Image (cartoon, rainbow, N blue to C red):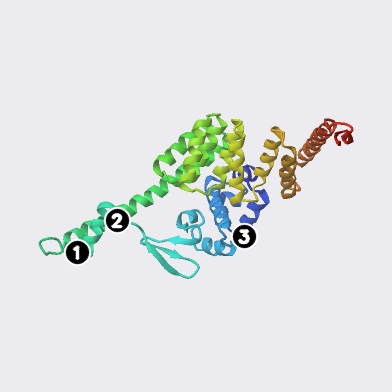
Amino acid sequence: MKLSQTAGKLKVSPQLLRYWRQIGLLNHPSSLKGDFSFIDLIQARFILRCRQKGISLQSLRQAVSKQNKDSWHQNLTLHNEKWLLERHQNHFFQLSDGQMVFPFSQKGNELADNAQTRGIKQGNGKETGKKAKCHTSGQKRLIYMNQNKRVVLRRLEEKYSVSLEEDNLTASENILLKIRSLAPEHTAAWVELGNIYFEKRELQKAQKCYEHSLELEPECSKSLYNLANLHFQKKQFAVAIRYYHKCLNINPMLHEAYHNLGMLFSQIGLYPEALYYLEVYLSLMPSSELNNGIEQLVEDIYAKYMNEENKKKNLLPFPQTSLIL
């Protein structure tokens, strides 16, 4: 994808993406050539989320510099939405102070096997040495499966990027369905699938995808923004306004949300609110190519607003002093 297309999907300015690329946060080979892949989209979303949670760019640069440039987003995570952690085989590593944070959770038979590995005695009083060997081989299989899953995911993400460049919605949808099946926790896949359904005007399917992505990541501003747009399309204005406000509470620099709120309030005749949000949009995007049209729209809305105010004044009883006894 081109820079402008990527910025449009992420709802950020192209200048911000260029800056991230200049400081080494987006250093995937495709982005260095000027194009942006699906991996770049995922990495940029992770950067946005970190910045919204107060993680400094310096901390991000230090963390990313230690990782493989193609897959650093798979090795870093946000814990409790405030700690930037590095994934290791058996624990998370807190980058700020170099401390091990906590072990990975274990469930079911894996937990039982692990207890036997530590030499816990069974009812006959004997330790279970044989089980320890089985657990070790099982661990190797699990590690291999996880590595294989990452390889498959990466290939699917690359195919998805190609399908976007070819503007092939059917292929994009099929690839995202495979990603979702392989990794149900893949928030970006749910969001992108919702976008495809939105473009195809399958609004019910799109809504379900966006809502599921919010179950995975409750403060995903992109999903909140997309849900607001969806309800705007369905003329469910009150719901749309609530989603726009939630989105702006998380990402107050999302200029498109101010633009769309201005358009929404203009459509329902609340001209002062429309003027406010459109003027905020213009202040955030002073050099946008669309500004001439928006500035003209502001003038038109202001004229309508003054016309409405003049009509109200003309409806006042005249002379007003005649009402005084």
Asked whether residue 58 appears in the rendered view, the answer is: yes
Choose top left, top right, bottom left or bottom right for residue 179. top left
* Image disc number at residue 120: 1
Q: Are marks 1 and 2 in contact (CB under 8 Å)?
A: no
| Mark 3 secondary-structure assignment | loop
- What whole-number distance in Å separates the C-alpha atoms at marks 2 and 3? 37 Å
For the image shown, how many numbered marks are present on the structure? 3
Q: Which residue is mark 2?
A: 140
Give the left or right position of residue 190, taking residue 303 as reference. left
| Mark 1 secondary-structure assignment | loop
**Camera-nearest label, 1 or 2:** 1
- Closer to the camera, 52 or 40? 52
Q: Which residue is mark 3?
A: 23
Mark closer to the chain start, 1 or 2: 1
Choose top left, top right, bottom left or bottom right for residue 229. top right
- Closer to the camera, 127 or 39? 127
Mark closer to the chain start, 3 or 1: 3
Q: Position of residue 167 (x, y in %)?
A: 57, 34
Mark closer to the chain start, 2 or 3: 3
Give the left or right position of residue 320, taking residue 211 as reference. right
Asked whether residue 168 appears in the rendered view, the answer is: no
Sort mark 2 into few (<14), some (14-19) or many (20+) by Cα contacts within 10 Å.
few
Q: Position of residue 313 (x, y in %)?
A: 84, 34
Q: Residue at x 50, y 31 (%)?
A: 204
Q: Are marks 3 and 1 in contact (CB under 8 Å)?
A: no
Sort mark 1 into few (<14), some (14-19) or many (20+) by Cα contacts within 10 Å.
some
Q: Amino acid at mark 1?
A: Ile
